[in-house]
Amino acid sequence: MIGRLAWRNVWRNRLRSLVVVLAIASGLFGTLFVAAISRGMIIRIVQSTIDNDISDLQIHSDKYVISEELIDVFPQSQLQAAIDKNAVLIDAYSFRVKVEAMATSANGSHQVTLLGIDKDAESRVTGIHDLVVEGTYFDTKTKLKEICVGRKLVEELEVRLGSKIVLSFADVEGDIMYESFKITGIYKSSNSEFDKINTYVLSDDLIPILKTGESNYHEAAFRISESALDQVYSSLHEELPGYEVMRWFEINKTLRAMSSMMDLFTFVMVLIVLIALIFGVINTMLMVVMERRKELGMLRALGMNNFSIGRMIVLETVLLGIIGSIVGNVLTYISVSWFGDRGIKYASAAEGLEQMGMGDTLYPELGAYTYIAITLLVLVTALIASIFPVRRVFRQNIAETLRN
């Protein structure tokens, strides 16, 4: 009975109730949509870094993690048994050699990270092969050593597809080596800084130059499903003493921090909006109580106790909050779903976004748990807002109210 009465009371003054509902809905929609854009940006950065660079898990020798010396390699055979033991849980893996180098053309030079890879294994671990926009991914029939470089590096060196660049770097003996490579592939990712630094050659071409020894590598990268990551990590960590086994969030701690900060950012934004809205709800419910003071006094005179009247006022306030949160969540869900599929083009800030690894298109994204958490927050806010009008009702003098 109390619930039905509260529902009818909410719609006695439809205009006022709709204003409160729309205020809550619009506040939540604006906050959640901005949070969805921000979250989408962070997720895109994290995912592109995992997909194109660090992968889900990496293994290095203990010494290499500390010093990153060229000599700190490991033979593939030492890892193979542990990898085979977890083969069912590992989606793909690739071995790499890495060296810091200077890329030089006739028009300029730039420091790069040179990665020697097996093209087939690497294509199963990273998405660089899918990002090639000019040329091929090491499929050119040429006698020259091939190199795949980023679009941004091509612009920096003022070269093009088919050009030759010279890479200079030290081998394991400390001798400076100069090698000429032909640009047979140009890739473009969503991160222009990544494109400027990372260059790829075949490990069969690089290992003899570095003199690290056949089948010796600096890094092993793995793709593993999220559900199996911790299990594989524990197994490899136990099986490989003397090696540093690291998950993606241990390799790049900034990525994990960004994800955590995003949840906190969303919570704080919504909390600020709800604090602002609570005053509007309190004001509205106080007006309702003042308008119905004679009616409420009559109910008390007829025997309805304070608890029942207070519960009715609380239910009215909660209903306004819940309706507003439902409308706000539905609007947010529709908008996030629409723009999440199609993206929001931001051409005017494309260069800045690409430097941060986001590309020129933003894709909003919001987890289901966010909608649930927001609804609960609104419910708590409505309960707090109902305290003041309920206190006002309890302080009314029945005789004086009826007489006036």
Image (cartoon, helix red, strand yellow):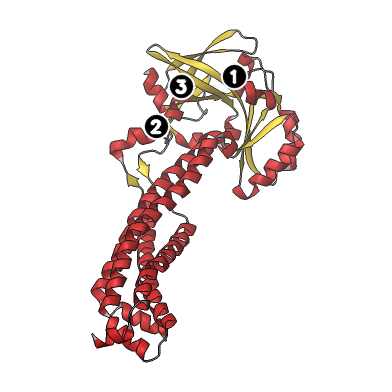
Residue furthest bottom in the image: 302
Q: As displayed, is residue 364 above or below residue 187?
A: below
Asked if disc 1 and disc 2 are in contact, CB closer than 8 Å, the reply is: no
Q: Earlier in the sequence, mark 2 or mark 3?
A: 3
Q: Earlier in the sequence, mark 1 or mark 3?
A: 3
Q: Amino acid at mark 2?
A: Gln
Q: Nearer the viewer, residue 265 or 339?
A: 265
Q: As displayed, is residue 263 above or below residue 176?
A: below
Q: Nearer the viewer, mark 1 or mark 3?
A: 1
Between the residue at mark 1 and the residue at mark 3, the CA separation in whole angstroms equals 15 Å
In the rendering, which numbered label is found on residue 206? Answer: 1
Percent x, y for residue 381? Answer: 41, 64
Percent x, y for residue 14? Answer: 26, 76
Residue occupying the point 50% across, 34% down:
128
Q: Nearer the viewer, mark 1 or mark 2?
A: 2
- Identify the residue position indicated by label 3 in the image: 183
Residue occupying the point 64% across, 16% down:
208
- Identify the residue position indicated by label 2 in the image: 355
- Is disc 2 surrounded by few (<14), some (14 to 19) or many (20+) residues within 10 Å? some
Q: Amino acid at mark 1?
A: Leu
**Image quadrant where residue 15 sits:** bottom left
**Image quadrant where residue 396 sits:** bottom left
Q: Amino acid at mark 3?
A: Ile
User: Circle 2 — which element?
Assistant: helix
Residue occupying the point 47% across, 60% down:
373
Percent x, y for residue 3? Answer: 41, 81
In the rendering, which numbered label is found on residue 112? Answer: none
Is 344 left or right of 262, judged from the image as shown? left
Q: Nearer the viewer, residue 6 or 52?
A: 6
